[in-house]
């Protein structure tokens, strides 16, 4: 069995984060595997701040603590982004409909009516109403929010030049965002209506998907032609614990044909690491995504049934993975954390797999527990101990 972790000094000076990411994702030897993560619950960051574990200056005037600052505190390598202006905008101002001591109901910038808690633990909003209900409302939404030629989508030349320079000189990997093909549509239609529409009016639903693909094919090239990219990233969140929210046949027949030319465009510009952020059980979608050229699974949630070790055995080098460390293990103590890392290690050693928590680090994880996870994970990745001890959060921390 190959082990691509060659240790410190294998390449003279350390590889840059960019070089390391590229080599891991292409099954090439590295000094040590990339150290990436996927952020934190807001409540967790606030708990750590109140306990004095995070520097007070991490908190912005609006009270939020950026994930990037916390990740860098733990030595996590970072991505830079150079994106086209895809998606739905320009947005309307939010309109408050009702507000009480602990919740607010409002119409967001796209016309979705949401009800959210404003005190206690933040939860997923309750969606009251959606802007797209039929063809007429779709066409109105499309014309207002998805106009491909809207002046707001034009990136000024000075911004393009600055981003181009960054993408070519940074030592961090650079990604380009290609958005969503059906997850956005679900957000604008609502899940129940999406399910009904896939049966009652599949042509209309496919028209929405096709419009998003047309937008990407029009707006991505000016960015792709200017920048240097290491990966492309999308977002869907279209699966439950039991599988995708629509019949896989619908994906194969109505969605994937529109994904294919976008994936081809990305690959024509040298991008061959392409992922979409999708929670839930994605097993039935993996072969469909691979077939159209999307080859990296992220964050690969374990609890719904996605096993990174089994998937690497099934798909071999065709499949790349980011994530795959069961977040629930963080609540089970050190022995469980170490056991989960050891379970993943053989697949990590073979390349094409960068392990990290399979979503944002959840609440009620102690700072000491998370330090232990980072300590053991980075040892498993092959990082030399003296470098791990240099992570600001781990200076002075005792294993």
Image (cartoon, rainbow, N blue to C red):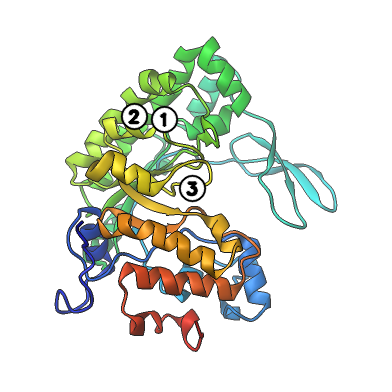
Residue 23, x across and y down, in percent: 21, 59
Q: Residue at x 45, y 23 (%)?
A: 208
Disc 3 to disc 2, how far (Cα)? 20 Å
Q: In the rendered view, does 303 fall on the left or right side of 95?
A: left
* For residue 56, above or below residue 364: below
Q: In the rendered view, does 151 fall on the left or right side of 185?
A: left
Q: Which residue is mark 1?
A: 284
Choose the circle earlier in sequence order: 3 or 1.
Answer: 1
Most extreme residue toward the bottom, as rendered?
A: 396
> CB of mark 3 within 8 Å of CB of mark 2?
no
Asked if one can make out residue 36 in the rendered structure from this viewpoint, the answer is yes
**In the foreground, 96 or 49:** 49
Is label 1 in a helix, a strand or a loop?
A: loop
Image disc number at residue 302: 3
Q: Residue at x 46, y 69 (%)?
A: 71
Q: Residue at x 20, y 55 (%)?
A: 27
Name the image quarter holding residue 213: top left
Image disc number at residue 390: none
Is label 3 in a helix, a strand or a loop?
A: loop
Q: In the rendered view, does 48 fall on the left or right side of 225?
A: right
Q: Which residue is mark 2?
A: 288
């Amino acid at each position: 069995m190959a082990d691509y972790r060659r240790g410190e000094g294998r390449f003279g000076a350390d590889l840059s984060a960019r070089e390391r990411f590229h080599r891991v994702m292409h099954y090439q030897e590295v000094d040590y595997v990339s150290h990436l993560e996927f952020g934190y619950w807001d409540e967790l960051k606030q708990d750590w701040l109140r306990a004095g574990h995070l520097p007070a200056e991490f908190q912005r005037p609006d009270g939020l603590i950026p994930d990037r600052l916390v990740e860098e505190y733990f030595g996590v390598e970072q991505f830079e982004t150079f994106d086209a202006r895809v998606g739905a905008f320009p947005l309307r101002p939010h309109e408050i409909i009702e507000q009480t001591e602990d919740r607010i109901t409002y119409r967001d910038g796209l016309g979705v009516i949401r009800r959210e808690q404003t005190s206690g633990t933040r939860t997923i909003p309750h969606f009251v109403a959606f802007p797209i209900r039929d063809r007429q409302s779709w066409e109105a939404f499309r014309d207002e929010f998805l106009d491909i030629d809207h002046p707001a989508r034009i990136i000024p030349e000075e911004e393009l030049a600055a981003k181009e320079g960054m993408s070519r000189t940074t030592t961090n990997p650079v990604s380009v965002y290609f958005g969503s093909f059906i997850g956005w549509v679900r957000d604008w239609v609502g899940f129940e209506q999406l399910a009904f529409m896939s049966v009652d009016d599949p042509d209309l639903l496919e028209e929405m998907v096709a419009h998003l693909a047309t937008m990407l094919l029009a707006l991505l090239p000016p960015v792709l032609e200017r920048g240097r990219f290491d990966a492309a990233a999308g977002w869907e969140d279209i699966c439950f614990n039991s599988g995708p929210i629509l019949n896989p046949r619908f994906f194969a027949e109505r969605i994937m044909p529109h994904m294919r030319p976008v994936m081809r465009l990305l690959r024509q510009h040298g991008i061959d690491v392409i992922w979409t952020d999708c929670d839930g059980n994605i097993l039935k979608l993996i072969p469909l995504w691979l077939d159209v050229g999307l080859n990296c699974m992220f964050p690969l949630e374990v609890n719904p049934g996605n096993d990174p070790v089994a998937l690497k055995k099934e798909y071999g080098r065709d499949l790349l993975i980011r994530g795959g460390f069961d977040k629930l293990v963080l609540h089970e103590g050190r022995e469980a954390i170490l056991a989960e890392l050891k379970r993943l290690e053989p697949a990590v050693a073979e390349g094409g797999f960068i392990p990290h928590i399979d979503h944002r680090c959840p609440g009620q994880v102690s700072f000491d527990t998370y330090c232990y996870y980072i300590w053991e994970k980075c040892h498993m990745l092959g990082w030399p101990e003296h470098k791990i001890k240099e992570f600001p959060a781990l200076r002075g921390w005792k294993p």
